[in-house]
Amino acid sequence: MTEHAITFPFPKHCLAIAVGMFLANPSYALQALSDDSLSNTTGEGVALVLDDFKMVFQQPNDLSTGSSYTRGLDNPSQYDTGFIRIIPTGENYQYIQNKQFEEKYKISYENQYDKSYSAVYDTSKTSEYNRVYQSEFDKAFTLKKTEKEAIYRAYEFEDEAGTLYKQRYDYWYDNVYNQGLNWFLLPAEKRKRSSESALNDLNNVDQWKNELTNRVNTKLTADATPIAQKNAEELAKDYATGQVELHAKLAIREVVNQQANIVHNRTKADVFIYGLALSKSDNSLSSRYSNQGFNWGSADNPWLFRAGTEKVKQFKNVEKDVGYLALEAPLATIAASESDNNIKLGFWTDIFSRQLNSSAEVDPSTGAPKSGLDKEHRLRTQFVANGLSLNGSQTRLFQTLDSDNPNHNQTLGMASLVRLNTNDNPANLSIDDANLDSKGIRISTAAKSDALDGTAVTPAIDRSLAPVFHDIEGLYLYSPNINLVLGNMYQPFVVGSEGNNIVLEVTRIPNVPEIYNKIYQNYEDGKGGYLGATAFTGATCNVVSCGTSLKASATDSTAMYQGRNATHSSIAIGTVERLPNNMLRAKDHDKATGVVFKGIDGTTKNLGSVAIDGVLIQHLKFKTTGL
């Protein structure tokens, strides 16, 4: 169940207070105004003050008359089973399967190819060469005979066989048959025999022609052989390579198909956030909920939802008015105030890795899936934070200015400053301090006992009890001060799309001095000089300072509130001191603390403090794929 008390102070004088900041710079703190002054402002805002507020998500459809924390139960946190479920949908499973198959297949194929080469190549090449050689020779022989037909015709009269035939004919004709007048003087019988002998030699011309053909064929064979060998070699290589590829594919296909079957991969997440609770900070990181209300904001420094306008340049050296909607937490005061660090935040979560083919069907009576959840693939953890302050945080929504990049041009832009601080002055923090748990974050996983770890896969399935986590075990972050700048009016954080995919992007800082001078920071080096150009006006946001300080009104002599125009982020955990130039330094003495691990047996491992200072996001892009 939920317990809460929200106050909306909307009398005219309070509304005037809420929008009084518009008389000056819209980021100034509030000042009292008369109702007559409202028409002179740039816009009106809605002020919100939380008074004695507390909230916890308990059992869905709880019919009890009160919270489990007011009924004297031994473990009231077991009823913190009201949940928020995050279900990713819309994956293109076939695309993912094809992509994974390609990646797995390529690696397996390359590993297998060398083995297949040595096993298959030589044998298959030799057999294919022997198979195709004769046909390649016949084709080359025929081709050469056609190409050199005229040459070989002339060769008949030049070859030795052709010459011998011609000599024999000439001999008998000249010396026996053709003796001129002497031939007539020969006896008729001799003349007849001489003529017949000559004719017999002429009739035996096939003998010489056969000899000539043999010699021609020998020469054709010599010309055709290297061509046939080359062609057969190339065909055999191609065939052998194909056999290697086929052998490699057959050797890995079955295994790879099984590995790349997307339906068996556990890459689908299912997240249940249980028992989300806000209450007043206490000294315990063992409980998620203190059952005490807290105040957040005041009449002169409330939460504010408002509209405003700022003249800025984005992407190009062209200045225009940009209208925005802003949600602003109460301003952070310059003077340290423990009253700001009064929020306790707690929840626990079950995070599942599910097969992609698991059913998305939901049981309408529980809001949980009917199947697909498995204890062996579950991460169960608890988050508890004490001493939180979000003061100084803000988010602005606006339409971006013209850009040559179509994904940035006149799209939804954001300028966000997220401040999560717990300790205004952690410089003297020690591992021996008794109240470390009053300002810290704990992340734990161990249950107090097996019997108190819950019986169901997750309570959403059957409305069973929540687990009871161990009192001590976990990761402790003492006195964390986290101040993140995610986009600003000069460097928007855009929400857009590329095709069907969603894009979240902190845009690049353009090469325009009038823009990057507003973002880059001029660091003082501690020796009277500066690191960087004097034109740089950016600043780092930390727990003490966050840009240009603000006055409650234009007539005030001193500023009361920290600014909200810083461009650089900082993360500090534990014993960290602020130097005169607004830089942070983690202390390293043996009592310094910040990151601590504690075991279920009470053992403690102190890893010391952490300071990450002056973080500027030059460009950051998140993009979904495969949608």
Image (cartoon, rainbow, N blue to C red):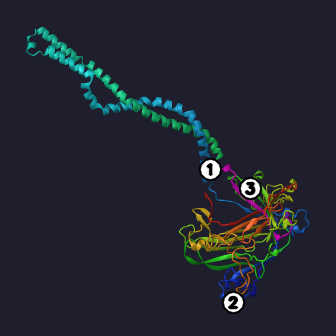
Decide: is 203 above or below 233: above
Residues 194 and 482: in front is 482
Q: Which residue is mark 2?
A: 37
| Residue 101 located left or right of residue 583 | left
What x and y, as percent, mark residue 411? Answer: 59, 70
Specify the amino acid type for callout 1. Gln
Residue 321, x across and y down, in percent:
59, 79
**Residue for point 57% across, 34% down:** 118
Task: Tell me residue 100's x, y (percent).
Answer: 62, 50
Q: Earlier in the sequence, mark 2 or mark 1?
A: 2
**Is residue 2 something one can see in this rendering?**
no
On the image, numbered disc 3 is attached to which residue? 352
Q: Nearer the viewer, residue 416 or 626?
A: 416
Q: Callout 1 environment at 10 Å: few (<14), some (14 to 19), or many (20+)? A: some
SS assignment at label 2: helix
Q: Residues under labels 2 and 1: Cα distance?
A: 64 Å
- Coordinates of residue 123 in the picture (x, y in percent): 53, 30
Q: Amino acid at mark 3?
A: Phe
Q: Please say whether residue 272 is one of the residues in the magenta stretch.
A: yes
10 Å crowding of disc 2: few (<14), some (14-19), many (20+): few
Q: Report which residue position mark 1 lands on.
A: 100
**Which mark's residue is nearer the viewer, 2 or 1?**
2
Cα distance in 3D space between marks 3 and 1: 21 Å
| 539 sits to left or right of 6 | left
Q: Quadrant of residue 214?
A: top left
Tally the numbered discs.
Answer: 3
Residue range of the region highlighted in magenta in the rendering:
261-287
Q: Is residue 108 above or below residue 304?
A: above
Q: Does any portion of residue 416 appear in the rendered image? A: yes
Element type at mark 3: strand
Pick the residue in front: 35 or 420.
420
